[in-house]
Amino acid sequence: MTESGTGVEGVPPAERGSLREVATLFLKLGFIAFGGPAAHVAMMRQEVVQRRKWLSDQRFLDLFGAANLIPGPSSTELAIFLGYVRAGWPALILAGVLFIAPAMLMVLTFAWVYVHLGRFPAVGWLLYGIKPVVIAVIAQALYGLGRTAIKGPGLAVLGLAVLGLYFVGVNVIVLLFGGALLYTLLQNVRRLRSQFVGLLVLPTSIPALGGVLSATSFTGASVSLLTLFLTFLKVGAVVYGSGYVLLAFLRADFVQHLHWLTDQQLIDAVAVGQFTPGPVFTTATFLGYLFAGVPGALLATLAIFLPSFLLVPLVFPIVSRLRRSPWTSALLDGVNAAALGLMAAVALQLGKASIVDPLTVIVALVALAILLRFKPNSAWLVLGGGAVGVASRLSTG
């Protein structure tokens, strides 16, 4: 990213703002940004384009497009971009941190309550009603993202292939990047004689590193804090698309490979992440606390968001060129389609743990219908699901 005597790239000094106004805006958004990435983006546009007139709609869309071209939580990365454009490097960090911090603290509080009260029946019935709503939210996200990402039959086949291969045990990173690479090669086969394409596929998961900085988790597993940090760092560096794609990676690493977590605990963590404002990636805070208390929560949060803070300034100068290249444009399309296949696979698996009787079927279907028809803030539906669960318990009780 370049800076010159005129200020941040493309922003004359007269249009530059203060750190205080950036901090005020993104701290406020951190407390009120319920409803997932689409809602976050809408709120940011209302604040920085319509109300404060920091930049034009076109500039805003360019930044949002850039956020979608790199791994990590797109709405958080958009906040980082907006902070940088408004007030430079310090604001880049400030905007991202303040957008994340309120959600992290709320999730940490819920994690403490979950660990200390999660086994009591009242909390269990609350989650009984919330979990089907979370499945409906994921299904709605799949529907909305699919309409944008699936641009043709080839991408549809790729997404379905990833869905099927996930269930036979193929590594999720191989599916994500391998599928995207295959699609890129097929789309650009005529250029193979003159161009070289390489793709580094990261390992399945970070190996456990003996007893280094170990702890005993709420789940009863022996946890290495270094393994925890590196695993969440890897996830933050490779997850494309919606934050819900995160679930596939979390399940592969912490449920299937490390055995630190159960499917039930994973869906509980997602439910809390959905109920609170801010990025879904704060699910890492909840899981980190389950694994290793407050140190685990802080390490997990730092690790999963750190790649975004590093990638935004690195990618910004070249992002406008990526869609102009047939190679990188096809690669991004393939990544998005594969990510949707992973989302669908995990939604099916978590649905088995959440939709367990006629009432939860009804809750999930009603929530999905409301989401598709009215597009409300999903936090209200999560609250409604919790109320249904508690009412169900009281009526049988």
Image: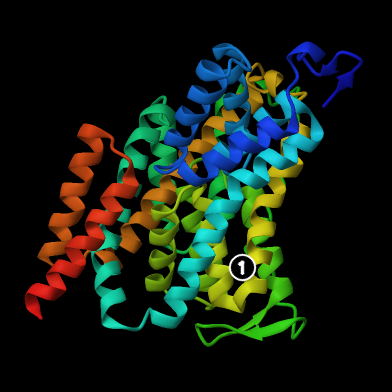
Q: Quadrant of residue 374?
A: top left
Residue 140 appears left or right of 162: left
Labels in figure, total: 1
The residue to which callout 1 is attached is 297
* Residue at the spot 92% in from the left edge and 15% down from the top edge: 5
* Residue at the spot 31% in from the left edge and 74% down from the top edge: 123
Crowdedness of circle 1 by 10 Å Cα count: few (<14), some, many (20+)? many
Which quadrant, please, contains the C terminus? bottom left
Q: Residue 125 appears at what percent x and percent y?
A: 24, 73
Q: Residue 389 appears at what percent x and percent y?
A: 20, 66
Q: Quadrant of residue 226?
A: bottom right
Q: Residue 337 appears at what percent x and percent y?
A: 46, 37
Q: Is residue 27 above or below residue 174?
A: above
Type of amino acid at the residue the image marks with label 1: Ala
Is the image coloured rainbow, by chain, by secondary structure, or in one colour?
rainbow
Q: Is residue 312 above or below residue 31?
A: above
Secondary structure beneath dot 1 equals helix
* Residue at the spot 33% in from the left edge and 41% down from the top edge: 377
